[in-house]
């Protein structure tokens, strides 16, 4: 019998099949094959013994958090309380794009702003480079998000305290996800979501996961990483060198675009920071 793993907790896996939930365990052989069952996995299981016999091939796979077969990832970021973290936003967009995941952006807490100019610039820029951007303050955007969720397995990523759980509860109060409480001393949220779980919503599934601040940020090489910044990849053919990394190379078209403010300065600043981090990681690895 085939089903979808919708929850993982303390070694037990909830498998949804034919409108029914089964609490299952993976067969012992999986431990020796180093094959971990993850939320989002499509599995073959025995409804009588409640043993998962097989994990079907995945279309994508994240290490942290442990989740597979995601159709869409909503990167949810508050504009205030906590302050907008563009470094983390670009980090998430980069690694998810690298893994060929469909990324969308949601900005929350716009009601706390007194000036919308800066956020409008950001929204227009991320839309220009190809990402769908929504705000929780717009009724039209909320309807659009509902349509995006329908018939899909979706994840909501972002640091704690940005309003992921509040947003999901706004869609459906029966989800009853505990909302974040902001620590005034730290200016960030306290973790309230401790496990990964898929929740049924609008004929689709949504995952409310622990904070993505520690998302696995691994790349095979710097060139692969450079392609994960979509606007850099789009214009890279205009650089002098075919494998330009847009760092110290002369006649780099990307750096010219940054100087002309055709590329958002914060995007390039984060790109340079991430490049240094990946260089060090690769150096330590080899």
Image: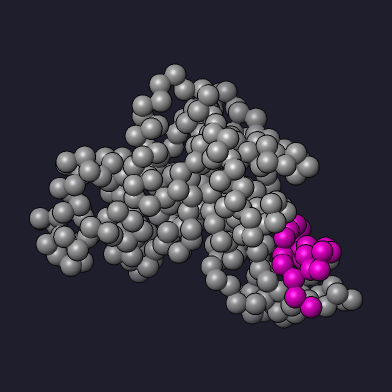
Quadrant location of the N terminus in the rendered image: bottom right
- Residue 253 position within the rendered picture, expressed as x and y whole percent measured from the top left: 16, 54
Q: Is residue 130 left or right of residue 185?
A: left
Q: Is residue 156 above or below residue 110?
A: below
Q: Is residue 103 above or below residue 264?
A: below
Q: Quadrant of residue 192?
A: top right
Q: Quadrant of residue 115?
A: top left
Q: Is residue 22 left or right of residue 269?
A: right
Count up the numbered dots. Answer: 0
User: What residue is rendered at 56% in x and 46% in y?
Assistant: 144
User: What residue is rendered at 59% in x and 66% in y?
Assistant: 69
User: What residue is rendered at 63% in x and 38% in y?
Assistant: 167
- Residue 184 position within the rendered picture, expressed as x and y whole percent measured from the top left: 57, 23
Q: Which residues are magenta?
A: 1-21
- Residue 130 position within the rendered picture, expressed as x and y whole percent measured from the top left: 38, 52
Spot the residue most to the top: 114
Residue 60 located within the stretch drawn in magenta: no
Q: Is residue 207 above or below residue 220?
A: above
């Amino acid at each position: 019998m085939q089903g979808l793993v919708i929850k993982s907790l303390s070694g037990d896996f909830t498998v949804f099949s034919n409108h029914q939930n089964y609490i299952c365990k993976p067969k012992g052989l999986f431990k020796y094959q180093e094959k971990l069952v993850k939320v989002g996995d499509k599995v073959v299981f025995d409804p009588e013994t409640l043993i998962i016999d097989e994990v079907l091939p995945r279309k994508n796979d994240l290490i942290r958090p442990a989740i597979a077969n995601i159709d869409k990832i909503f990167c949810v970021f508050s504009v205030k309380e906590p302050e907008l973290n563009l470094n983390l936003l670009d980090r998430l967009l980069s690694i998810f794009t690298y893994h060929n995941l469909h990324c969308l952006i949601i900005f929350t807490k716009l009601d706390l702003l007194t000036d919308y100019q800066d956020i409008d610039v950001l929204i227009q820029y991320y839309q220009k480079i190809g990402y769908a951007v929504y705000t929780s303050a717009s009724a039209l955007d909320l309807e659009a998000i509902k349509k995006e969720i329908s018939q899909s397995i979706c994840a909501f990523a972002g640091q704690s305290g940005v309003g992921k759980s509040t947003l999901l509860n706004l869609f459906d109060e029966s989800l009853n996800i505990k909302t974040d409480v902001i620590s005034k001393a730290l200016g960030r949220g306290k973790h309230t979501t401790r496990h990964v779980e898929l929740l049924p919503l609008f004929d689709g599934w949504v995952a409310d996961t622990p904070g993505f601040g520690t998302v696995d940020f691994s790349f095979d090489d710097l060139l692969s990483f450079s392609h994960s910044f979509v606007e850099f990849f789009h214009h890279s053919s205009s650089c002098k060198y075919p494998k330009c990394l847009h760092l110290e190379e002369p006649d780099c078209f990307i750096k010219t675009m940054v100087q002309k403010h055709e590329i958002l300065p914060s995007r390039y600043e984060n790109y340079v920071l991430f490049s240094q981090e990946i260089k060090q990681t690769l150096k330590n690895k080899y």
